[in-house]
Amino acid sequence: MAKYFDVHPQTPQARTIGTVADSLRSGALIAYPTDSCFALGCRLDNHDGLERIRSIRRLDDRHHFTLVCENFAQLGQFVHIDNDVFRAIKAATPGSYTFILPATKEVPRRLQHPKKKTVGVRIPDHTVARAPLPELGEPLVSSTLLLPGEEEPMTQGWEIKERLDHVLDAVVDSGDCGTEPTTVVDFSSGEAEIVRRGAGDPARFE
């Protein structure tokens, strides 16, 4: 049965965020809000959590997982990024974008694309999404909470708890959340390629 955390959207309660971070350290899989829509998240070394995300979303091994990072210092530990790409990404973050880049050795192989050795990274423009990250000390492995066969993600924390109570450990809710996933930009070749048009304005990468 999933725990339910009701968090203030601008000033999340420190004690609650601490409990969420403790849960993640203990192997929890959580649903949490972002600046695009709700997402599923767990720690980097949480094998079980990763498999549960794959199962919930019915993902194959070619799916790009996303590392949700606190800031650029953290992002730079997990992806290779040259100066031109850095400037382009810096200008668009924090925001509703996911960037696909070559992974560093800090990224577990199971999180990388099996052939391209790439991974998705993002810095969300959402206080609650970033709140546990300083305490956790690492990014969250994340994937949009879009269920198989459904056109749009769920937007209400209570609905997520009701429908996924048996497969999640916690739901973090801070009120209304968007319905559109991030815009995905692939920079793995050094040039911007828009893979998915979503909540972030793709015009700056065209």
Image (cartoon, helix red, strand yellow):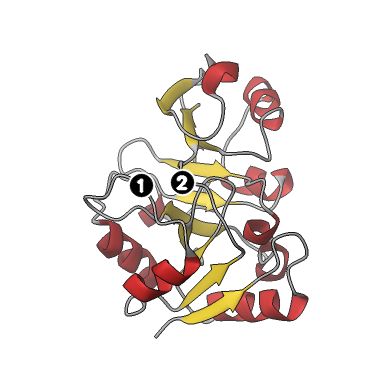
* Residue appearing at x 46%, y 41% in the figure: 180
- Please give left or right for residue 113 compared with residue 108 in the image: left
Determine which residue is flagged by label 2.
179
Image quadrant in which you'd find residue 19: bottom right
Name which of mark 2 and mark 1 comes first in the sequence: 1
Which quadrant is the N terminus positioned in? Answer: bottom left
Image quadrant in which you'd find residue 81: top right
Residue 113 is marked as: none
Find out whether the residues at labels 2 and 1 contact each other: C-beta distance under 8 Å: yes
Residue 152 is marked as: 1
* Residue appearing at x 70%, y 31% in the figure: 90
Compared with residue 58, is residue 194 higher up or lower down, i.e. above or below?
Answer: above
- Residue 169 x %, y %: 44, 79
- Residue 99 x %, y %: 52, 35
Of 190 and 176, nearer the camera is 176
Compared with residue 201, is residue 43 higher up or lower down, i.e. above or below?
Answer: below
